[in-house]
Amino acid sequence: MQKLVSHVIRNSADKWYGQWITADIAKVKAEPEFSLAQMFSGQLPAQEPVESRLRPPVIFYKEFNVPDKALRDATLTITAQGIYQATINGVAVTDAIFTPDYTAYTKFLQYQTYPVTELLKVGKNRLQIVVADGWFAGRVSVSGGSGQFGDQLAALADLDIEFADNTELQLGTDETFNVTTGKWRYADIDIGEKQDLSFSAEPTTEQAPAALAVFDYSRLVPQEGPQVRRQKVLPARKIWNEGAALIVDFGQVIAGRVRLTTTLALKQTIKLEHAEALNQQGKFFKNIVGRNKDQTDIFVGNGQKATLEPDFTFHGFRYVRITGLTKLDLADIQAVTLYSDFAPTGSLSTSNTSVNQLLQNIKWSQRGNMISIPTDCPQRERIGWTGDMQVFAPAATFYYDTDQFIQRWLRSVRADQQDNGEIVDYSPAPKDFFNSTDFTGSVSSAGWGDAIIMVPWTLYQRFGDQQVLKDNYNAMQRWFNFAQTSAAGDKTGSDRYIWDTKFHYGDWMFPSVMMKSGNPMETAQLTKDLVATAFLAHSADLLGEISAVLGDDSRIYRDYASKVKQSFAKHFITATHQLTSDFQGCYVLALAFDLVPAKLKTGLVQRLVEKIHTNNDLLDTGFLSVPYLLDVLVDNGQVELAKKVFLQEHCPSWLYEVKQGATTIWESWNGIQPDGTVGTLSFNHYAMGCVLDWFVRDVVGLTSTTPGYQTVTIAPQVAVVNEFDLTYQAVSGEFKIKQIKQTDGQHLTVTIPTGVVAKVQVPNAKGAVQTVGAGTYEFTY
């Protein structure tokens, strides 16, 4: 058989030696239907015990002989319906986990190729592939349904062995593989995992031959972007008793799992429950509720000392409650953080300890929400909300090189795009998403669907590669066409440019409403039409810029944006120069997106300032407007107010969370209320960490003025801290900006990489700008 070289994309059956294999025991049991409307009404369906509903991960294995001659090379190419763990002779072929990553599986499924030469031996060898439900078949929808992309676990693999004498041994998955189960009695991404160590390491029961299966090959592509790996390992900080249970505090909210070393008696069972917060009384508190959001792992002993760690699940937590174990030393338990393995690129610290904690909170929330895809939270929904990524994308490129990670997710977004051009609210989109439109009546929303335009534009600005614009351009145009058609409806005149024809999330979860009624849908109803129209104009503006970069005609988009802006002023600005939706976030978006005539701008700025002052100088911006709040204030001469809002320690504010002991960014500003009441909310949502981007640009002063940081400005202008120290590895080179306070003033030191031109403007320089090239420069002011 002809050798398959690495550059061949294996997207048809004839490009594989192996075939898809499955088994009767690889069928996933269906969960009852449960809609979002039912979920948000507070209902919870009656359920069978977890072990009755979930089935064990499937083990596919084959023994084979390697002849006694010199090996040159060996590779394993593999994928699965489910997530897999592959071993040769008991040794893992990779340290990557949750392979083959999370994508829009029915249209886009990755395979991986690993070097395995060192794992083989002369004589008898064993290839084993364990496949668990994972994202493919697990309970990964918002409402906790199963079989989201299919209900049949399966594996596909080729083992290609080359010998020094130019002969080959080629082995592929087929019906000669055997099927069994092992210590994993069930494993679900959201629910958790049960391991029974008393099962034999070499399973001898329930064995049967694998069955050939007919599944799609055309969706297969080689690995794109970083894989998920175990990252930092955190020690336990404190252990105490709570009733019959042990409570462990790791001191940091993470996404990951526990690693525990202990001796369990034969059939002794311990249960590990995970949570992000304690309640007001300092007791263990399950802050995540909902169907199949258990976050619980179970281990059954075999009478021997063992290190216990789940393989096919992860949790969002800081605290673990362990029942079934009476004693535990700090040294015997650790928290293993998990996230995609991207290269670090940025570091930032300041002279303000609270600000430093905020910056670290943002970094930890990014880590916890970048496990294979960008998610909203790592413990409840765990899904790729387009709005969250749109909001956070500019900040997401600072600490880590997320370019390929985000681009892979964008491929799933494009795969999920509807025939009419709609970009769905989250991607990869499981089947339950499309079965739950009764809740909002829609699969898309302005500000969420606009991610298909805004996120690629951000990546282009940060990394300077037009390919991301080219890859997404058609999808951008289709979304734009949907948006303008939807807005127009059957209307006439300027009404055609107001997007009030469908549901939108609006300025989602702005604090004044959330702290009063706690109903996020109220925030949507109060702001959706104005906010949707604002994004309609903004995306048209951006699409005009993108089309110009790509050499296309931009006039259609620029003209449309102009008409939307004219209609916005006519429909949403009152005779008293206020907005019809008189909320902070609406003013922020109107000003940030340049939606108002120049003669009305001053009045809107004054009204925004008035509303902030009336709110005790606290923000009241929602999901879509927070990224622009401080920029709008600074750009309109309100620098001192921007400082005051940023440094606030009362609720709602960034530093209020820090003051409450936060180690990540919260879903809701008042997740822990001033009286100590703890909500059943996520305490790890990166979206409001978008303020990092503003901090880098306006406090430290680093702004890219051409794509890829080929030219930059360095202009610190908002003195919220006295000192800071930034390092950033851009695609153009490494930037360093450090400010220290000395008796004669502030000393600013900047280092510019080779080939980059920087314009430096320090405060109190009366507008003077110095243009410098590569090198290190010092300024005093």
Image (cartoon, grey):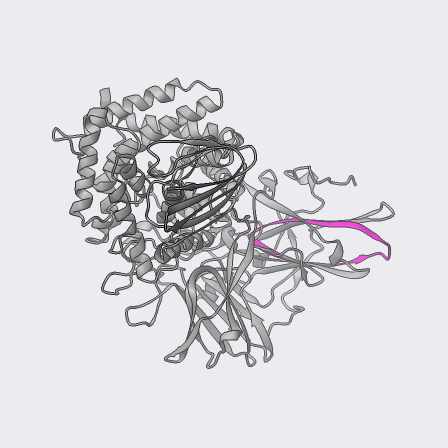
x and y percentages locating residue 426 in the rendered image: 41, 43
Q: Quadrant of the N terminus?
A: top right
Residue displayed at 55% across by 62% down: 311
The answer to whether residue 140 is visible is no
Q: Main secondary structure of the magenta part?
A: strand
Q: Is residue 544 left or right of residue 13?
A: left
Q: Is residue 426 left or right of residue 10?
A: left
Q: Nearer the viewer, residue 229 or 123?
A: 229
Please tell me in which quadrant of the rendered image residue 590 appears: top left
Is residue 78 found inside the magenta-colored segment of the image?
yes
Residue displayed at 45% across by 22% down: 548
Q: Is residue 426 above or below residue 545?
A: below
x and y percentages locating residue 684 in the rendered image: 39, 56
Q: Nearer the viewer, residue 477 or 399?
A: 399
Q: Quadrant of the C terminus?
A: top left
The part of the chain drawn in magenta is: 64-85
Farthest residue toward the front? 744
Residue displayed at 36% across by 26% down: 541
Please tell me in which quadrant of the rendered image residue 584 appears: top left
x and y percentages locating residue 482 in the rendered image: 37, 29
Is residue 234 found inside the magenta-colored segment of the image?
no
Q: Nearer the viewer, residue 217 or 425?
A: 425
The answer to whether residue 612 is visible is yes
Q: Is residue 627 left or right of residue 27?
A: left
Q: Nearer the viewer, residue 289 or 240?
A: 240
Residue displayed at 29% across by 57% down: 656
Question: Exactly how many numbered labels are in the figure?
Answer: 0
x and y percentages locating residue 587 in the rendered image: 23, 36
